[in-house]
Image (tube, helix red, strand yellow):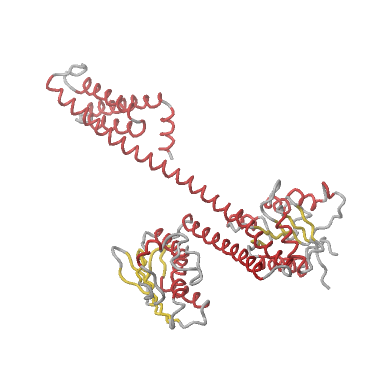
Amino acid sequence: MTTLGRILLVEDDPRDVELTLTALEDHKLANEVVVARDGQQALDYLRCQGEYIARARENPAVLLLDLKLPKVDGLEVLKAIRSDERLKLMPVVVLTSSQEEKDMVRSYTLGVNAYVVKPVDFHEFINAVKELGVFWALINQPPPGSMKK
Amino acid sequence: MVHANLEQRLAGSALLRYGLSVAAVGVALGLSLISNAYGFKDVELPAFTLAIAFVTWYAGGRPSAVVVCLSALCYNFFFTDPVYTLYVSVNEIPSYFIFVAWAVIIAVFAAVRRRAEHDLLHARDNLEVANKELESFAYSVSHDLRAPLRHTAGYAELLRRQASSALDEKSLRYLDTIQESSKRMGVLIDDLLAFSRIGRAETNKAVVRLDQLVDEVVAEVRRDVSGRAITWKVARLPACHGDRAMLRVALVNLISNAVKFTRTRTPAVIEVGCVEGERNNLEIFIKDNGVGFDMQYQNKLFGVFQRLHLTEEFEGTGIGLATVQRIIQRHGGTVRAESAVDRGATFRVSLPKA
């Protein structure tokens, strides 16, 4: 019996948020999605501070991380996560428009689990998001301490 | 580098420049006096000439003039009879004149050479800046242009889902066009980015086994056209000198073109071979029996996004041949094509031998 893990989607563009949520809804993966609109908000959520001070201390099953974010950008969030004892095991998937080699190298060097370039074609986009959601939120066993429904 | 530092410091300080002039004359003078004392004759002129050239190279025109004057004075005072006076006799005037003229010639040569080197370094720095700007431009294009494109395609699809019952056939066709256009724009962006990368990437030149490379490319292209009747005639190709990855891209473009434009033929005949080129080059040719092109448009053949056929007849963005030309140019070679309408085409690529 697979339980749906929580997905933290870090994305600043409201349109990409809507498209990603629609794609997840198509495959019934949207029930446990939390959206953070910039890097600072994402870190506040993960560390249970700021507006999330009352949140129970459990990590999402996966973090879908955009790179270009206001305030704290994607790579800085990644770096902060990988240096935090309580967060460093959490799976992180970079989901970005950038196909530039230097972004890929930086991301993998900082310890990202996967790097996905958002396809321009919507059907491919839906498929990619579905594959990611099914794998990371259903099939993959997240590290101990992650929340399950 | 020591040279660069010295030049920079001299450029900054007039005191240093003129100090150097005096010092250079001093050294030349000392050398000459010492050699004279040990019986070596005629060291003065070469020594002073060296001082002039050295000061012109590192400090410029005016300090050089100072060295010329000081050298002439020293030469007169210390090395011409009567010694230790500044007396110049009438029949010595021509030789002083020639000395000064000679010194000026040396100074001018040194100055011209120095200016050329400066201009080159300056141009190189400008190019580096331009290259960096281009890189960040390409990054912007790849990242920032793709997002709205993705949104256009995505929301068009959401609209289709939401309103398909309310949309008539014409409206659905308009929606199809919106989606196809954004798809095409995505392909154009990718192609343009790849093209610009070729211009900026470092080349790793080594010996490339062309026969191996062509076999690889033909095998890959064949996989995509399994249904068709194509006769391949691939000759034994020698090795050449170049960047394997780039040459691969060029060959893929040329051979896929041959495959594409022979689509109307049964069987299609594609030939890859090699002949001796001029100087130390070899010339590879790719010949097909496809639809060919009109030679009067041949200078448009290698233009970026330039096409000679309608999209309905043959798909493509028109960047393939532009990419091939850029790659071959980076290898110091040339590409040219011969064709006649409906009578196939032959593309000839010259490359340096291994």
Nearest the viewer among B26 and B90 is B90
The spot of residue A143 in percent (x, y) is 78, 63
The picture quadrant where one finds residue A118 is: bottom right
Placement of B113 over or under B28, stated as above or below: below
Nearest the viewer among B143 and B290 is B290
The spot of residue B129 in percent (x, y) is 49, 45
Image position of A47 (left or right of B112): right
The spot of residue A4 in percent (x, y) is 81, 67
Q: Hey, which residue is sitting farthest left in the picture?
A: B91
Q: Residue at x 57, y 61 (%)?
A: B185
Q: Residue at x 44, y 64 (%)?
A: B321
Placement of A18 over or under A1, stated as above or below: above
Counting the numbered discs, the total is: 0
Placement of B201 over or under B315, stated as above or below: above
Placement of B141 over or under B275, stated as above or below: above
Identify the image quadrant of the N terminus of chain B.
top left
Image position of A4 (left or right of B266): right
The spot of residue B25 in percent (x, y) is 30, 26
Identify the image quadrant of the C terminus of chain B.
bottom left
